Image (tube, rainbow, N blue to C red):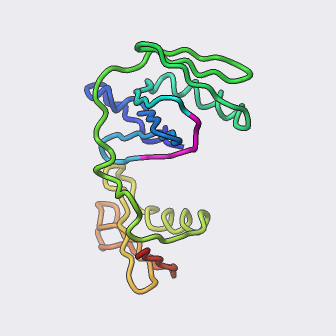
Amino acid sequence: QTHHALSDDQTRYTLMGICLDVQGNCLSATTTDGHRLAHAEVPCVSAQTMCVLIPGLDVTTLVPLLDATCHDEVLLRLYGQHLDVVTDRATMAMQLLQGQFPEWRQVLPPTPVVRVPFHATELLAVLRRVRVLSRDVKSRSVGLTIQDQRCVFDMEATPENPEGLLMEEMACEVDCPE
């Protein structure tokens, strides 16, 4: 769920891996390329706390292994700078990256300030329509403004669309937890 945000910048090698963090009964995986941050959590049973960096190249091998065993139990064995990922079907051993992963907890709020549920297919369709005119990869970010039960997705003018702002609105249910 997070490997799409791995960096390919070899000068920032710690961003080329997944930060796997086990604390209490929660296993989290976090990646960032310096612009995007992806984070996922799953419940786990752990006797110890650990925070390790799995190399991106190993992740490309590990993802299909875990997809194939999605209903099986997975065991993580840490020893020194090595990690074994053990399933009923296979064991994968890897040498971990050394270094400090960025403090991602400072980026994500501990509890959501605003929750806006979307149907994935509707959200994807809106994002595709807003981005369709841009061919410049670096400027393909889409803005989101939430106001009065309306979500406005927009993209600034680009060389391909000098006319100005691309914008689309959709109704949404905004939930602001107290």
Identify which residue, 76 or 38, lies in the foreground. 76
In the figure, is residue 98 to the left or right of 152? left
Identify which residue, 137 or 41, lies in the foreground. 41
- Point out residue 58 in the picture as x, y percentages from the top left corner: 51, 22
Residue, far bottom: 148
Q: Please report the residue visible at 40 percent of the width from the left and 27 percent of the height from the top.
A: 53
- Point out residue 114 in the picture as x, y percentages from the top left corner: 41, 71
Q: Which SS does the magenta portion mostly show?
A: strand
Q: Is 39 part of what is drawn in magenta?
A: yes
Is 108 placed above or below 91 here? Answer: below
Residue 112: which quarter of the image? bottom left
In the figure, is residue 107 to the left or right of 29? left
Q: Please report the residue visible at 49 percent of the width from the left and 38 percent of the height from the top.
A: 3
Magenta stretch in the rendered image: 38-45
Residue, far left: 11
Q: In which quarter of the image is the N terminus?
A: top right
